[in-house]
Image (tube, grey):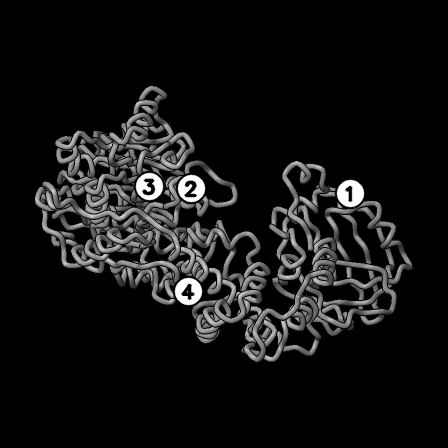
Amino acid sequence: MTKTVPPAASAKLSAPQRALLKLDLQRDIDLALHLPLRYEDETRIVRLADVRDGEVAQIEATVQACEVKLGPRRQLLVTVDDGSDTCTLRFFTFYPSHQKALAPGARVLVRGEVRGGFMGRTMLHPQFRAATGELPTALTPIYPTTAALPQNYLRRAVLAGLARAELRETLPPGQSPVAWSLRQALEFLHHPTPDVSVEALADRSHPAWQRLKAEELLAQQLSQLTAQRERGRLRAPVLQPRTDGPALHAALLQALPFALTGAQQRVVAEITADLARALPMHRLLQGDVGSGKTVVAALAAAVCMDAGWQCALMAPTEILAEQHFRKLVGWLDPLLAAHGKRIAWLAGGQKKKERDTMLALIASGEAALVVGTHAVIQDKVQFQRLGLAVIDEQHRFGVAQRLALRGKLAAEGQEPHLLMMSATPIPRTLAMSYYADLDVSTIDELPPGRTPVLTRVVHDARRDEVIERIRGQIEEGRQVYWVCPLIEESEALDLANATATHAALADVLPGVLVGLLHSRMAPAEKKAVMSLFTDGLMGLLVSTTVIEVGVDVPNASLMVIEHAERFGLSQLHQLRGRVGRGAAASACVLLFSTGDAPRLGQVARERLKAMVETNDGFEIARRDLEIRGPGEFLGARQSGAALLRFADLSTDAELLAWARALAPVMLDRYPELAERHVHRWLGGKAEFLKA
C-alpha cells in the first residue's frame, strides 16, 4: 500500500506527483476510488459525412496538409480526409511534436467537436494519435483533475493504484445489497463496456454505483458509531448549579430583561441535564436566526461557572465574538463580580500587553468565562479548569480546531462538555446521517416581538428605486444594510464590489453617513465602523458577508443584497436575519442581475423563490438540501473527511437504512472487518468524525 508522503519529500516530486498529493490521492485505494466524472466513447469510428454539426465524433483520416498560419494569432491548420469528407483541425497552442505527428500522409485517429462554417468543417484543439488499427474495448474515463495533472498521467496512476489496491471483501457473508463485489464495481466503473446504459452511469443507479454508495455509507455509519461508543467511555466534569448559596444560573434568569420562550426553557433543561452527568456532552443547539441561542449558551455557562469550572465560547469572526462578548458582559459581569470572577476577551488583533493580562487571568482561573475567536484554542491559552466549550456557527470551524478545544482538559484524563450552535437548521435526513453521533436540541420558536421580514426580488435595472427606498428609511430614522459579494473587481465575475458601491452610494446620498465594512480591514477599523452603526450614528452600512451572523441592530429595517443570485440559500437567509429585530416593519431586497444571459439559471431562480415564499429557517434548510445537496450544512466537518462523494441522501435512503442497521452488527460480531472497512474508506480521517 502507498505510504503517505512527508512534506519534506514532496518538494522533490514532479508537478504531476505534487498534484496527486493535492487531490489527496496518496494510497492505492484512494486512486482506485478516484472515479471518472464522465466517459468518452473511443471504441467506434464514424464517417465524417455522417456527423452533424456540434456532435463529438472520432474519425480515422489521412493528413492532406499541415501549415502554420501567421496573423493576429499564430495557429496550426491541418487538413484531413477520411474518404467521405474533409475537415480542418485548428490549434492555437501547438508544439513541433504536433507538426511531426500531423505531417502530410500520416494516418491518424482524431476526436473532437465537429463545427460547420463558411470555410468548411473544423475541429478546434481535437485529441489525436496515430491510427494503429486497434481501438479500445471500453469507454475512456475522464477523471476530475487539476491543470498540473494531465488525463493520461492520471489514468495510468489510477489503473496502477487499482491493480495494487487491497480489495478483499469487508462485508459479512450475504450482507451486500447488490450482487457485485467491490473489485467488480471499481473495475467496471473505470472501464465500462460500450453497451452500458449511459443514463445508469450518469444518475448512478447502475449496480456498480450502488455497491460503492453502500460501502461509503457503511464506512460513515461505522465511524460515527465507533466515535459514539468511544465517547461513552470518556469522562467529563459533573457540572451542577450550586446549592450552598445563590446560584449564578438562577440569578441570571432573574436578571434577564425578558422571559424565556417555551422552546428555550426546553433546550436549557436538556443541556443542564447533560452537564450534570460524567459523560461528555456532545450537543448541537440549532435554531433559526434570532431564536435566542446566545441566552441559552449564557445559562449553560452559568451552570458551569457555578460548579467552579471555566467556560470558553468561540465564534468564527471577531464581529460575532464581540457581539457575544457585549451581551454576556451585560448579563453576567455584575453577577460574576460578586464572586471575584470576570469575563476574558481573546482575539487575534489584541495588543501583547492586553493579551498577556488575559492569558494570566485564564491560567489563574479568575476568568470564569473566556470569549473570543480561534485565538481561544492556541497553545499559549492554558485554562485552569475548562468544563464547557461552546462553539458558535460550528460549521464555520475546522474539525481540527474543535478537537484542539476539546483537548484542553486531556491532561486530567477528561474532556470538557461541548455545545455547538448553528443558525443553519439541519434537515432530519442529514442529521440522521452526518450527525448520528450528536444529540440535537432545537429552538423551534421565535421570541415575541420579532417582526416578519417582507422579501422582494428586484432586477438591478431598478436600482434607483431601491436607493430612493433607502433614502426614505433613513429620513424616518431607520438604518440600512447593503451587502456585496466581493471586495475588489474580479475579471472572472462581473460583480459590483463593496468599495465602488460604497463610493457610489455616498455620492447619491449626501448628508448620510455611509460606512464600509469588509474582511480585509484591520480589527480596530472594523470595530470603529460597527460601533458607529450600532450606536445609530451611521445610516447606511455597505458590507461584504462579514455581517452574516451575530450583528444585532434593532433599528436596522432594510437589507439590500446585491447579486443575490450568487449567494447560497442559507447565506441569504442569514443575511435577511440581520433586520426585523425591532418593532419597525422590515424588508429585504434581493437585487439580481442576469448579465448577458436572457434570464436567471434554474438554481438561482429556485433560491430566490424560496426566500420570497418563506421566512422559516427549517423550510429554507429543507429546500437548500433539495437544491444543492448536503455540502452547505456539513461545512467544516468535510475538512476532516470527504464523506459521501458518491451517495446522495435524497435518493439513497434505502442504502442509508441498510448501513445504519449493519453498522452495530459489524462492530459487535465482525470487529476486524469493520476496522478494515473504515480504514479503506477513511484512512486516518476517521479521527475527525469525533469532533
Picture residue at 85% right of the left edge, 52% below the top: 66
Look at the picture and state if 160 lies above or below 59: above
Q: Earlier in the sequence, mark 2 or mark 1?
A: 1
Picture residue at 60% right of the left edge, 50% below the top: 24
Q: Earlier in the sequence, mark 1 or mark 3?
A: 1
Q: Amino acid at mark 3?
A: Ala
Q: Amino acid at mark 4?
A: Ser
C-alpha gap between disc 4 and disc 3: 25 Å
Please identify the residue farthest to the top as the structure is shown.
353
The label on residue 404 is 2
Q: Are marks 2 and 1 in contact (CB under 8 Å)?
A: no
Please name whichever residue, 335 or 32, is drawn nearer the observer in this view of the structure.
Answer: 335
Q: Earlier in the sequence, mark 4 or mark 3?
A: 3
Instruction: Determine the secondary structure under disc 3.
Output: loop
Q: Are marks 4 and 3 in contact (CB under 8 Å)?
A: no
Where does label 1 land, which residue? 70
C-alpha gap between disc 4 and disc 1: 60 Å
Please name whichever residue, 669 or 226, is drawn nearer the observer in this view of the structure.
Answer: 669
C-alpha gap between disc 3 and disc 2: 15 Å
Q: Residues within 10 Å of mark 3 (few under 14, many from 20)?
A: many
Q: Amino acid at mark 1?
A: Leu
Where does label 3 land, which residue? 315
- The location of residue 573, given as percent across then percent down, is 30, 53
Which callout, 1 or 3, points to the residue nearer the camera? 3
Q: Earlier in the sequence, mark 3 or mark 2?
A: 3
Q: Could you tell me if residue 600 is visible in this image?
A: no
Instruction: Determine the secondary structure under disc 2.
Output: helix
Where does label 4 land, which residue? 433
